[in-house]
Image (cartoon, grey):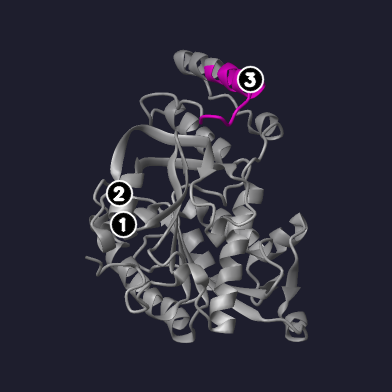
Amino acid sequence: MPLVAHNDLPTFERLRREGVTVLSADRALHQEIRELHIGLLNMMPDAALAATERQFYRLVGEANPIAQFYMHPFTLPELQRGPEAQAHIERYYEPLEKVMAEGLDALIITGANVTGPDLSLEPFWQPLIRVLDWAMANVTTTLCSCLTTHAVLQFRYGQTRIRQPQKVWGVFPHRVVDQHHPLVADVNTRFDVPHSRWNAITREQFEAAGLRVLAESEEGGVHLATSADGFRMVFFQGHPEYDTISLLKEYKRDALLHAKGGLAAHPPFPRHYFGVQEKALLNEYRSRMQEARARGGPIPEFPEARVAGRLDNTWHDTGEAIVGNWIGLMYQVTHRDRRLPFMEGIDPDDPLGLRRG
C-alpha cells in the first residue's frame, strides 16, 4: 500500500507528484495496517544514487496493498563519494549499524560501479559480504540486483561472472520457465526487462549452484532466479526498476563521452529500445556531432527531450507484479510465521543449499 515518509528524503515528494501514495508518519500512526520495514542498500555511483532510490521506492510503493512500507536507505562507508552525494547520504540515509541493530523485514541491494574484472578487489567486497551474512541470519528475504547477484554467485557459490563479447544492453523479451513459482504468479509468461551489463552469470552457472531459474531471455540471459528454497535470496540480472528514459540517459552519457574523447567509438543503440524515428534523430545528432568535432566547434545539444517523449515502457507493470509477489510472500512468512508450500523439503538450517551433496 503506501510508502511512509518517516523522514524528509526528497524522493518522497517526487513520488507524490508522480501519483504514488505516500503517507506522512503522523497519518501512518492512525492506520490499522501492518508495517513492513524494507532496507535499501544503495551502492550506485553518485550520478545514479537518487534516481536508484526513486526507482526502487516506486516499485515497492506501487507493488502491494497489504502494508505500510517504511523504507530504510543506507550505503557502505567504504564507497568513495563526492561532496554532494556524501551530504545527501549524511542527511537522509541511516547508518549501517543502526539498520542492523533495529532490523528489517526485507532487504534490497542495488548494483555498484566497478573498476576491474575481479569483484573481490572492489572496496565494497568485504563490507557487502558482511551485510549479506547478517541478512541471512536476520532478514526474511533479500533481493539482489545485477552486480550484487554476480557478487553473491562468486563468494557464496564459486561461480564467477563471464565477460560478454558485447554489452548486454537493451530491452529484451523474457519467458517464464517455472510457471508454478509464486514469484511469477499472475505474471505474463512473456515480458520485457531492460539489461545493461558487460558480464553475465549463465543459466548453467545458476543451476550448478543449485539455484532456481524462473525467467530468462534468449538474448539477455537469465533475469530472475532464487536460492534453493525459492525465497530467501532473489536474484535479478536485469533492471525492472529502470525508468522509461534510463537507457536513453546511458546512451547520452556514452555519446557525450565519445564526443569529448573519452570513448574510442560512438555507442551502439540499445537493442529493442529506440524506434525508427528515434534512431533517425540520434543518427542526425551523431552526424552533427562528428562535423562539429572535425571543425573544432562546440558539441551540439543532445536531443534528449525530443527522443524521450517517444519512448515506450514495456516492463514496469511486470516488475511491479514480481516485486508485489515478493512482498506478499515476505508478509506471509514474517507476519504469519509460516513456511510456504514451495519451501517444503528445504533444510531450514541450510536454505541456500550450500551443504548439498
Which residue is found at the position 75% from the left and 55% from the top?
18
**Disc 2 from disc 1: Cα separation:** 9 Å
In front of the other: 208 or 200: 208
- Judged from the image, the secondary structure of the residue bearing numbered disc 2 is helix
Q: Residues within 10 Å of mark 1 (few under 14, many from 20)?
A: many
Numbered label tally: 3
Figure check: 17 above or below 194: below
Q: Residues within 10 Å of mark 2 (few under 14, many from 20)?
A: some
- State if disc 1 and disc 2 touch (CB < 8 Å): yes
Left or right relative to 118: residue 301 = right
Quickly name the residue at label 1: 153
Can you tell which mark lies on residue 205?
Answer: 2
Look at the image and give the residue range highlighted in magenta. Answer: 270-286
Q: Is residue 82 visible?
A: no
Which residue is found at the position 63% from the left and 68% from the top?
9
Q: Residues within 10 Å of mark 3 (few under 14, many from 20)?
A: few
Can you tell which mark lies on residue 194?
Answer: none
Left or right relative to 83: residue 51 = right
* Amino acid on which disc 3 is placed: Val
Residue 350, percent from left and from top: 32, 74
Figure check: 204 above or below 346: above
- Whether residue 284 is in magenta: the answer is yes
Figure check: 153 above or below 130: above
Residue 199, percent from left and from top: 34, 42
Residue 224, percent from left and from top: 47, 52
Q: Which of labels 2 and 1 is toward the front?
A: 2
Quickly name the residue at label 3: 276
First in sequence: mark 3 vs mark 1: 1
Residue 207, percent from left and from top: 33, 52
**Disc 3 from disc 1: Cα separation:** 38 Å
* Amino acid on which disc 2 is placed: Gln
Q: Principal SS element in the magenta part?
A: helix
